Structures are given as structure tokens and as C-alpha cells.
Image: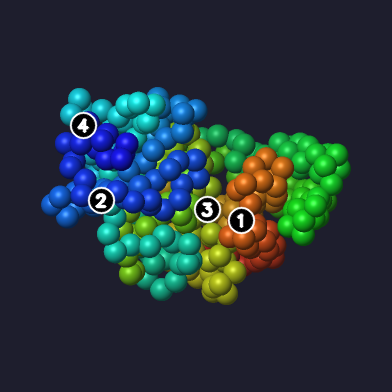
Amino acid sequence: MVVAGVLALYYRIIPAEVCEGPAGTATCNYVARDTGGRRWFVKAYPASADLGAERRALELAEFAALGGVPVPVMRRTLDDDLIATAGGLSVSVAAFVEHAETAEGGLSGARWAAVGETVGRLHRTLARHPDGPPRRGPSREVCDVKRGRQRLERLLSRYAKQPPNCPFEVWARDAAQERLDGLPATASMLKALPSTLATQIVHGDLSSLNLMLENEKVAAVIDFRPPAHRSPMWELGRIVLDPRTVLAAPDWPAGLATAAVAYREANPAMSVEDLLTVPRVAAGYLACSVYPLSEPLDDPAAVTSQLEAYGRARHQAQRVLWERVEEAEEVLRDALH
């Protein structure tokens, strides 16, 4: 009823029904149907949220839409704000994406090219963002082995003080030790990267949960983060080499090549040299990551059966990427030249 009141008072949306929507990582989400039958996605922010940062993220989504990226249309308040706050509740409202599903099921068929084209269009658009043009940055900042070592050692120290008490925690601790032991080989693998890589404003959290698909097409890109310079090749690899895709599609190097070709057609300013780094950057990033191995200690309530399955898939996919990185680079090279 509180959400319904905010919609009526601040957005001039008269809801006929409000129900819980898809679970968010840090938000409570609702779906509202107005008296005309149109549905709206309502995101309610926690009291601790940085609403300034959330507004910048929503503005970035609107900027991406100007370049033709499929982004749900934001509904502004009567005062032309992107977030309304009333009675301690802060919400944003966007058009509900009908007949779509997340990309959690992985990429296959024509979806490879569709996703590659969409990410290329996204990066081409965000390269013109007023927060700064693309620039070159040290490749070690994309896959920071030194920082990865510090995080893994800190995590293992915490597990030593608080021994695991369930099978997933035991697995997470052992996986962290395996990653730590493999960091010298990871550092050696990453020496093959160019000394610098492109950085620019990117989506910031382009995961399979934040990419909506309708059949073979991209229906929507959602849940942007505030503008920040990061590697666009890290972001491309994060979505097209999602662990579930890598494990479910043995021909993923060919799929990656298809996505990369479509990406470059949409964003010809990106160099072939940078695009060739995608599989190595993806493998190196996963090897240096502590997520979700740290979740049992950082946020035990977040450890669900789905997260456990994803954690195991992520760890296994890192091995697969490692084993086939040179093959993937060769397939990419043939496709892009």
C-alpha cells in the first residue's frame, strides 16, 4: 500500500495491483499494473542506499538509450526526478519488460551475435559520455594479481579463524586455496596481454541477470551502475563468457568470435588488438576473484542453492577458460582479420 501511494502521489500512476517482483541484490522490487493495464517495474531502495549514486546510474541508463541501446523507459516524477522519496521509502519506476527472460540460461545460436551487437552499441554510446572519453590504462589494473593475492590470503585467514561449518563453506575455502596456489601461473598467463588496454565508461554490472532476452533478440539492458571507467573488454567477456555459457556450450570459442565480430561492426573504434584480449582477461579476472567464495563470511543470508551452484560453475569455468585460452584467441584472430 505504501508503494501504491507513492506511485499515485509522485508518478500519477493509479495502480490496480502491486505485487512482489524479481528479487534484487540490494533492493526490494515490485511490479505494478495500472488501471490501463500497463505494468511498471518499481525498485525500492534500502535506507542505506546512496541515492545520488543511484540517480547517476539511472541517468547513465537514459544516456545509453539515446544511442539506441534497448533500455526500459524511466518514468520520472511530477517534479522530473528519477527517484521519489516519501515516508522513508525511496523508489524508481521504469516500464516493465514484457515477454523477456534473463540471459542466465546462457548464449547459443543467434543470441551470440545479438548480444555482441548490443554490447558494441552500448560501448560506442558510452564512449561519448560527458564523464570522460576512452583512454588507455595499464592492463594489470584489469586483472590485478597482487590485489587478488591479498584478497585470497585475507579470506583464507578468516576461514582459519572461523572454520567452515557446512559443505559449501568447505568447498569455498578449498577453492580459495586453489586459486591462491594458481596465482603464479595466472601472472605468467597475463604477461601475454598488451601493456595497456582501453578503458571507458561502461555499464558496470553487465551480468546475465541484467540482460533481458526475447527469443533470439536482446530485449533490455538493465541495472546500470554509476558512471566509471573500466575495461570494455572485461565487460564484454563477463557477459559473453558467462560461466554457464562456457560450461554448456563446448563451441564457445566460435560463439565468442561471432559475438566479437558483431561487437566490432557496432563499435568499429574498438581495436582488434583489444578484442583479442577478451578470453585472457576473462580467465585472469576469475582467477583473481574471491566472489562468491567470501559470501559465507560476508553475507551468509545470501548463500542460496542458486548461489552455491553459480559459485561452483564459476570456478569450473575459470579452469576451462584457462585450458582453452590460446584456442579461443586463435579463433578470434581468424574471425577478426
Q: Earlier in the sequence, mark 3 or mark 1?
A: 3
Cα distance in 3D space between marks 2 and 3: 36 Å
Q: Earlier in the sequence, mark 2 or mark 4?
A: 4
Assess whether mark 3 and mark 2 are in contact (beta carbons under 8 angstroms).
no
Instruction: For marks 4 and 3, give the one nearer the viewer.
Output: 4
- Residue 99 rendering spot, x and y as whole percentages: 29, 64
Q: Earlier in the sequence, mark 2 or mark 3?
A: 2
- At a point 42% along the width and 35% down the height, the residue shown is 45
- Residue indicated by mark 3: 238
Mark 3: few/some/many CA within 10 Å (<14, 14-19, 20+)? many
Identify residue type, mark 2: Glu
Cα distance in 3D space between marks 2 and 4: 16 Å
Cα distance in 3D space between marks 4 and 3: 40 Å
Q: Secondary structure at mark 1?
A: loop
**Numbered circle sitting on residue 17:** 2
- Residue 164 rendering spot, x and y as whole percentages: 81, 50
Q: Is residue 80 visible?
A: yes
- Residue indicated by mark 4: 9
Q: Is residue 293 above or below residue 334?
A: above
Q: Earlier in the sequence, mark 1 or mark 2?
A: 2
Identify residue type, mark 1: Thr
Instruction: For marks 3 and 1, give the one nearer the viewer.
Output: 1
- Which quadrant, please, contains the N terminus? top left
Identify residue type, mark 3: Arg
| Along the viewing direction, whichever of 165 and 58 lies nearer the viewer | 165
Q: Secondary structure at mark 4?
A: helix
**Numbered circle sitting on residue 304:** 1
Q: Earlier in the sequence, mark 4 or mark 1?
A: 4
